[in-house]
Amino acid sequence: MAFTSFEFLISPFGGLRVSTENFEFINMEIPYTVTARPDTGLYNAKIGIWLFLASEVMLFGGLFSAYVFLRVGAQPGYWPHGLLNVPVGTMNTLLLIGSSVTVVLAWASLKMRQFTQYKIWMAITIVCGLIFLVVKLTIEWPAKFHHFGAYIKTEDLAKYEPYLGNNYLAAKGLQPRVEITGDLLNEEALKDDSIKEYDINADAIYADPTNPAMDRPTFWLRPLSGKTIVVQKSDVDYASMFYPRHSAYFQVYFLITGLHGLHVLAGLIVFTYFWLPVGSKLYKQNPEHLANRIEVVGLFWHFVDLVWIFVFPLFYLL
Amino acid sequence: MDHTTEPAHPPDHGAADHDAAHHVNAHVKGYVLVGALLAFCTALTVGLSYVNFGTPGANIIVAMVLATFKVGCVGAIFMHLKSEKWTIYRILLITVLFAIGLFALTGLAFHDPIRY
């Protein structure tokens, strides 16, 4: 093995000088990329990706435990429900599941030495992942950035009872509503302290708060009520657009879905790399090598799918 | 034994490759069926979320049981954990233990005796 005499030297002038004694390591072939290493029974990249996925479990595990901590500790009414678009979330879930199927079919095609099939399944995988990201970035997130919520002070909730319906909710044993949401008609009120009120084109739920159909709020499925509710700033505990600063819910939502989105993007970059002529070249050199690489990135993609399988019910449905 | 170098690539048209291809081909239909099962479970999760199981906690448990089943399917079939090498099981075992510890720490936070 040639990788023996590589060394870095920091020159006294602050530059980095690399020893030219031996550069053979550049052409060093990474061992066990195709066949299994005798002591582990696995090719090296497979162990590598599983160790990486183990670290990913701890990363997302930490975020999910933060979610549990924040949700369980939230005061009644302060953990929002129904703010996300369930049909869109369902579609995105099906897209990821579908892409998990197509990526494993792409790998199977390589194992069966059907390169054209591999290209087709991989293309479908890339399209599914792209649609997922586009929907996330152009529909789901922007829709939130244009929505507004104002948390009413506890002592002033009674003033807004016709919109909140808390007596009705208390009688049914449901959690109270402490926030009025909708489109903010006078956005300048967010910055201008001389404006003393928020004019909100309220979500439908506030126009008919005692309708049993509104017990389970689903803001995004229904149009705005068209009814303008004037909320005095002096009655408001906290108000914000649906940015991360709005609530612990949106902080953890944007963090987890954003990090998940970055993982989707990373997977797509690698898929595209192996879909381009690089994959074709590698296939001609050694098809099993390409199959192993697709298996490794496929394992990463399945993990991305696994994370979403928990994200979807926790944020969209419950 | 020297494990730092890989033996020369085996010929690609050998009987072993043919057997491997046949083995994979036998699983293709299974992959599609599992995908369909996962899609069905997704629809079921959405549908059941509109059913009132008595308490919000009960609804969460139902959804998490379904999600865990789906994760099990993806892991066992798509990630081939159904029949994987012990090296990987060992890695995952340690990971699961640490993940359980992580969530246990979160749980312990709710029993923190400090009060303000």
Image: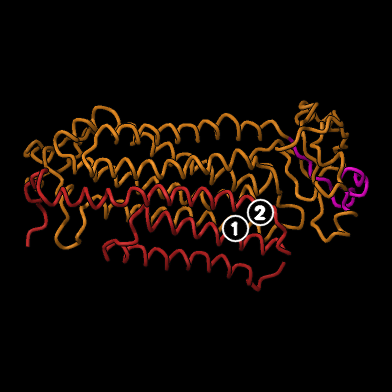
Chain colours: A orange, B red
Residue A292, above or below A133: below
Relative to residue A29, is residue A193 drawn left or right?
right
Residue A41, above or below A113: below
Residue A148 is at least partly visible in this image: yes
Labels 2 and 1 within one chain: yes
Label 2, label 1: how far apart the Cα atoms are: 7 Å
- Label 2: chain letter: B
Which of pointers 2 and 1 lies earlier in the amino acid sequence?
2
> Residue A160: within the magenta?
yes
Please name the residue that numbered disc 2 is placed on.
B49
Relative to residue B5, is residue B108 drawn left or right?
right
Q: Could you say which quadrant of the image residue B73 lies in?
A: bottom left
Badge 2 marks a residue whose secondary structure is helix
Please name the residue that numbered disc 1 is placed on.
B63
Residue extent of the magenta highlight:
A148-166
* The N terminus of chain B lies in quadrant: bottom left
Q: Which residue is drawn at 63% across and 71% down?
A: B112
